[in-house]
Image (cartoon, rainbow, N blue to C red):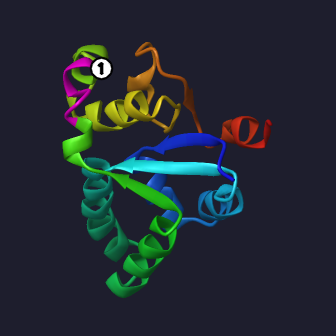
Amino acid sequence: MQGKRLVIDANILIRAVFGQRVRQRIAAASEQVAFYVAEANFEEARRYLAQLAPRRGIPESIWKASLDTVMSAIQLVGQEELALVETEARARIGRRDERDWPALAAALLMNCPIWTEDQDFFGTGVPTWTTATVDIYLDTP
């Protein structure tokens, strides 16, 4: 049973595709934690993966398969759902990085923290966890 919830930012999704630690952590926690990603952040991650993967010598078929595997443990939050809290999310994120509002909106909608490496979420009233600290959240009852 999933008792905890956690929104994943685009940068974490990219790390999950390119690395093992994040991907393994999501897989290991997926029975106890409901993971979410805003549709816009998923699309952002896909765009960056398409740019970065060739530079790393990773074929498209490989990174797309890895992304599909990771997404099997993550629920996509659609734009229609996020529209319910878009105004509040945009107001909270302010001018830090207006493109970050979808992840913040998903966290507000799901009433949960964000797993990110992005400091723009600090001060928005939503807890954030980095990859270095997320185990504290994931491992606590």
Within 10 Å of disc 1 (Cα), the crowding (few <14, some 14-19, many 20+) is: many
**Image-quadrant location for residue 9:** top left
Question: Residue 111 appears at what percent x and percent y?
Answer: 48, 29
Q: Secondary structure at mark 1?
A: helix
Residue 57 in sight in this render? no
In the rendered picture of this protein, how many numbered marks are placed on residues? 1
Which residue is painted at 40% across and 27% down in the image?
108
Q: Is residue 53 left or right of residue 33?
A: left
Q: Looking at the image, is 12 positioned above or below residue 116? A: below
In the depicted view, which residue is nearer to us: 125 or 15?
A: 125
Chain part drawn in magenta:
83-88
Q: Is residue 79 left or right of residue 31?
A: left
Question: Residue 39 appears at what percent x and percent y?
Answer: 28, 52
In the depicted view, which residue is nearer to us: 30 or 130?
A: 30
Question: Residue 7 appears at what percent x and percent y?
Answer: 47, 42
User: Please, what is the three-letter code of the amino acid marked with disc 1?
Assistant: Ile
Question: Residue 120 appears at what percent x and percent y?
Answer: 38, 24
In the depicted view, which residue is nearer to us: 81 or 113?
A: 81
Which residue is painted at 75% across and 35% down in the image?
136
Which residue is painted at 68% across and 59% down in the image?
31
**Image-quadrant location for residue 109:** top left
Residue bearing mark 1:
93
Which residue is painted at 26% across and 50% down in the image?
78
Task: Report the quarter where the C terminus lies.
Answer: top right
* Magenta span contains residue 38: no
Residue 46 in sight in this render? yes
